[in-house]
Amino acid sequence: MTICRYFLQLSRYFWGRKQAWRYWLLFIIIISLSLVIVRVSVAIANWHKEFYDALAAMEGSKMLPLIWHFLGYMLIIVGFVISGSYLRKRLMFAWRQDLTYKLQQAYLEQHNHYKLRFSQQVDYIDNPDQRLAEDVYLFCSQTLDLIRGFTLNLARLISFVGILWGMSANFVWHWQEHHWAMPGYLVWVALIYAIVTTLLMHLVGHQLQQIYVQRQHLEADYRADLVRLQENSEAIALYRGEQHEASKLRTKFAQIRANWLTLAKEELKVEAFSATNLRINLFIPILATLPMYFAQSITFGGMMQARSAFGNVQDGFNWLVDSYKQIMQWAAVVQRLGTFHQRLLELKQANQQDVEQDLGSPSVDLEVAITPSSTSTATPATSPMLQVAPMLQVANLNLLTPEHKLILQDVNFTVQGNNWVLLAGASGSGKTTILRALASIWTYVQGEITLQAQRPMFLPQKPYVSYGTLQELLSYPQNQLLDLTRCTELLHLVGLEEFEPHLTLEQNWAQVLSGGQQQRLALARVLAYEPDMLFLDEATNQLDNEAAYALMVILREQLPNTMVIGITHQAHLLPLFEQQLDLGEFKSASSSE
């Protein structure tokens, strides 16, 4: 039932919206093409009777017209199969695109991609990248394939059961002096055989679903380790850590091997049963119709027609057996994608009252008040700014760990205007965590935060430097690219003028720029964005004191109206801050960050 619930939750976004009528129409066309193929298959079953009766009667004059009929049937089937496949791929990608965008938005909004690492409400969600990139594709493609296969075989069942029943409606089984009337004898044989094989298949392959889930998990973990190795290749080389990495990768791959061997063993059982069942399927129709043929109740052509009809009915009854492996793979995908979606829903619905209820403390709301214009990160920095002085007020703030242990208690302070305020305190005093709380990405808080700013900006210790051009990196997080002239000015301001010729060169700059150069780039972004409230977390700790001081002076000169809340252990920078807030005053006696 959990798989069904996940499936309905994931499907309703695309198929339940008002604009979905065109996709429902496309789906109906795809199913209709499949039904036409079934109808042609019925005609082919009747053709079998005519052809083999003519063959048995040596009526050569009927052969050529019958052959032309058969070629016509094949032409229709091939055309409809190709058309249906193309339309199904178009529909699948439209669904995949819609679901990907929905989950991607839910993953990125309200900093959920960050909060996933700390939420303790449900089991850990591993490798969200794989779930978005691979599992969504598998979910959409396998769902459409299974629905089409089920509909096609159900239509076959309905169409051919009538033929099969009619051919064996008056069958009487003779054994010595006993006679048993068995209306619809061939239908009952096909049904009983299908029930037996379905039960046996489930008995043989019921463990496959969890093995497939584990396989996806292990493969994704191995790929993630390879990505991390590439991203940190310089540090690994300097540490001479290749042997350690090789050992770790071998361990991960050994887990993949163990899973693969288990999977191969289980699939061997399923495939052996399927192969055996397939060979028996070829013989069962002949065996079932032999008593009727020997009783001369059907002709040789009728026997061939019954064989064709029996095969189609058997395919309909045996759909679960034939598709069992694919269904188990689909169920594994639905489980992984459904748990990911469920976690995102829980994050969306979570509020501060839940945390406080767990703590058994009075309910205190977290309030972050930001003026509307601050939410537009795509607004160019050159746009006119409303002259509203920035203001930050923290009242009765308790800062907690994900395990709900106090880090800081009863924090109260107010900052107004263009003041530079230093958050001071020993290591582990909660400086970085309080910045996360001010950025609304750390939700384990009690109290009130009022942040009045039009363009707040947070600079973490490790700059975000992605694959792209320097022009794109300087413009981040704005959607509109800075012009090259402005980019050149910024590079000169922060001491990166040597990279001016490479502004439009696309590459992985995280592997090109040193740690200090990346921090210079991050400060250039600040100058481009022109925030009115800036939060700095050790933003120059990879630069020497003189370079760090020079860059901070440039910030003060270029952004004279900006409030700065900073964390630094560089003594040369302390004179730049007009106020200092010692977080040690708010440290809880039992806390540890």
Image (cartoon, grey):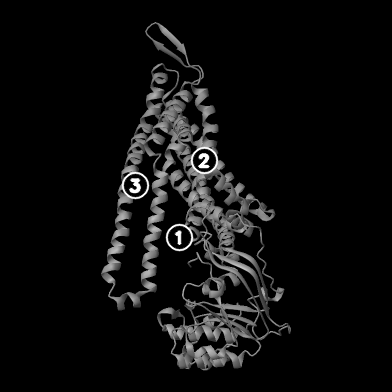
Nearest-to-viewer mark from 2 and 1: 1
Give the amino acid at mark 1: Asn
Q: Which mark is residue 411?
A: none
Position of 593 with respect to 286 (left or right) is right
Give the amino acid at mark 2: Phe
Position of 269 with respect to 348 (left or right) is left
Determine the secondary structure under disc 3. Answer: helix
Instruction: Say which residue label 1 marks.
Output: 127
Vertical placement of residue 588 versus 558, above or below: above
Give the amino acid at mark 3: Leu
Residue 280 at x, y = what percent? 35, 32
* Residue most extreme to the left: 243
Seen from the viewer's position, the closer of residues 272 and 420 is 420
Residue 541 at x, y = what percent? 46, 83
Q: Is residue 543 visible?
A: yes
Nearest-to-viewer mark from 2 and 3: 3
Seen from the viewer's position, the closer of residues 320 and 412 is 412
Lower sequence index among marks 2 and 1:
1
Residue 465 at x, y = what percent? 48, 78
Determine crowd level at label 1: few under 14, some 14-19, many 20+ residues with C-alpha closer than 10 A.
some
Determine crowd level at label 2: few under 14, some 14-19, many 20+ residues with C-alpha closer than 10 A.
some
* Residue most extreme to the right: 387
Residue 156 at x, y = what percent? 52, 35
Q: Gap in Å between the C-alphas at discs 1 and 3?
A: 21 Å
Vertical placement of residue 398 versus 361, above or below: below
Query: Quadrant location of residue 477?
Result: bottom right
Q: Gap in Å between the C-alphas at discs 2 and 3?
A: 26 Å
Q: Which mark is residue 263?
A: 3
Determine the secondary structure under disc 2. Answer: helix
Query: At x 41% / y 39%, what residue is drawn?
Result: 206
